[in-house]
Image (cartoon, helix red, strand yellow):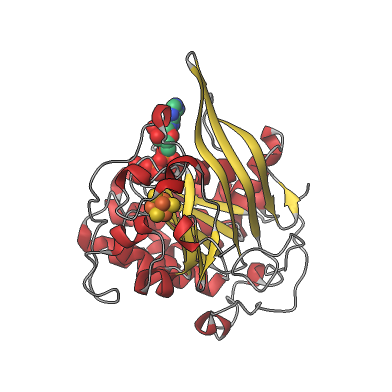
Amino acid sequence: MTDIVPPHPGPLPLSGETERSSAPSPHPNPLAAGERGPSAGEAGEASSTAPLLDVRHLRIEFPTRRGVLTAVDDVSFAIAPGEVLGVVGESGAGKSLTGAAIIGLLEPPGRIAGGEIVLDGARIDHLPHDQMRRVRGRRIGAIFQDPLASLDPLYSIGSQLIETIRTHLPMSEAAARTRAVELLQEVGIPAAARRIDHYPHQFSGGMRQRVVIALALAANPRLIIADEPTTALDVSIQAQIITLLRRLCREYGTAVMLITHDMGVIAETADRVAVMYAGRIVEIGPVADVIRAPKHPYTIGLMGSIPSVTTDRERLVQIDGSMPRLTAIPSGCPFHPRCNRVFDRCLHERPELFEAGTSRAACWLHAPLP
Ligand SMILES: Nc1ncnc2c1ncn2[C@@H]1O[C@H](COP(=O)(O)OP(=O)(O)OP(=O)(O)O)[C@@H](O)[C@H]1O
Ligand code: SF4
Ligand SMILES: [Mg+2]
């Protein structure tokens, strides 16, 4: 496992993604050149190209005194180079754990108990700590809900950016500082050449999150995991940050796994969406199709009260009942106690993901006829 990224002649076409296929030319930063390589992994669902990230049958467990709790169960999905995958679902669905497992930040006693995480054709789920640290930052960037969690209050943002750049890229101090100022300009920090020497507490929450985006992009990673990146920010700032993230990732050709409760953010930003429930993906497909014609009863419930997918931003609606606790995941289809379409088979047999139009849904209503 090395940091070597295979060379590639140019942007890859993505299925159903004309906008991205005609995306702006590669970023002027010379480091961005040659970064957009195809991967050697298996073909992923809904992607016509080899995936950048391929998560296969991921299972995350917590051993407890009363037995092993399964928090993420048989989760599989792929992200193509440059693609934005939205991940949505109520609290406790397993979204953050999935993101943490990919980036190697699953906190013990949580553990990957099954499956594989493949980045650019090579497994990263069982890398030693120091190798995973190199993958993190260099090949996978992270943006979390609280920008302060990603910034060290004792160091200027410039020194943090320069250190991140130099940890991952062969650059002199002076070149890294020039690059850091450029990055701060790109994320919209005014007077970046002066502000680079300021400390995190001297920035507002929105400006701090811009700095975190600069840090995440500093080494030109091919994938960013963004876990609720705007939830802690004022509503007026949220849209700016999402617009910025989307623009920069398109310019850089960076793929994004965007975890959020906000369907408006998903509608505006993502190419595909994965809906999670009780540690499983219950529906995955192109975002426009899932929003316009959701297939799984849970997704239908989530989308129910969104009046207009393109203009109105609305948080997930409440569905009667609540997400089951890990100690009491229902048999069969885990959604069955809350489902208004439940029938006998749902109580006993767990549905896999079945083809449902352009999407896939884990629901017996979409099982192929025998
Ligand atoms: N350290 C832990 N020990 C036991 N269970 C845990 C631990 N961390 C998370 N869980 C459980 O795993 C499940 C999934 O958690 P996760 O944080 O991934 O949810 P989420 O979808 O990100 O939710 P939210 O929208 O609230 O952030 C939850 O039921 C949670 O209680
Ligand atoms: S499998 Fe049954 S209970 Fe589950 S979502 Fe489909 S209809 Fe509802
Ligand atoms: Mg979470």
Task: Report the number of discs.
Answer: 0
Left or right: 366 with respect to 294? right
| Residue at figure coordinates x 77%, y 69% from the top left | 7
Q: 67 or 133, which is in the foreground? A: 67
* Residue 115 point in image, percent of width and height: 66, 42
Image point 25% across, 61% down: which residue?
237
Query: In the figure, is residue 369 to the left or right of 265?
Result: right
Quadrant where the C terminus is found in the figure: bottom right
> Which residue is at the front of the view, 157 or 368?
368
Q: Height in image: 168 above or below 83? A: above
Answer yes or no: is residue 302 visible: yes
Q: Is residue 245 above or below residue 282?
A: below
Q: Is residue 72 left or right of residue 93?
A: right
Is 14 left, or right, of 227 in this rendering?
right
Which residue is farthest top? Answer: 65
x and y percentages locating residue 48 in the rendered image: 66, 74
- Residue 328 point in image, percent of width and height: 39, 29
- Residue 190 in view, yes or no: no
- Classify 165 as above or below 321: below
Q: Is residue 174 above or below residue 190?
A: above
Q: Residue at x 69, y 51 (%)?
A: 118
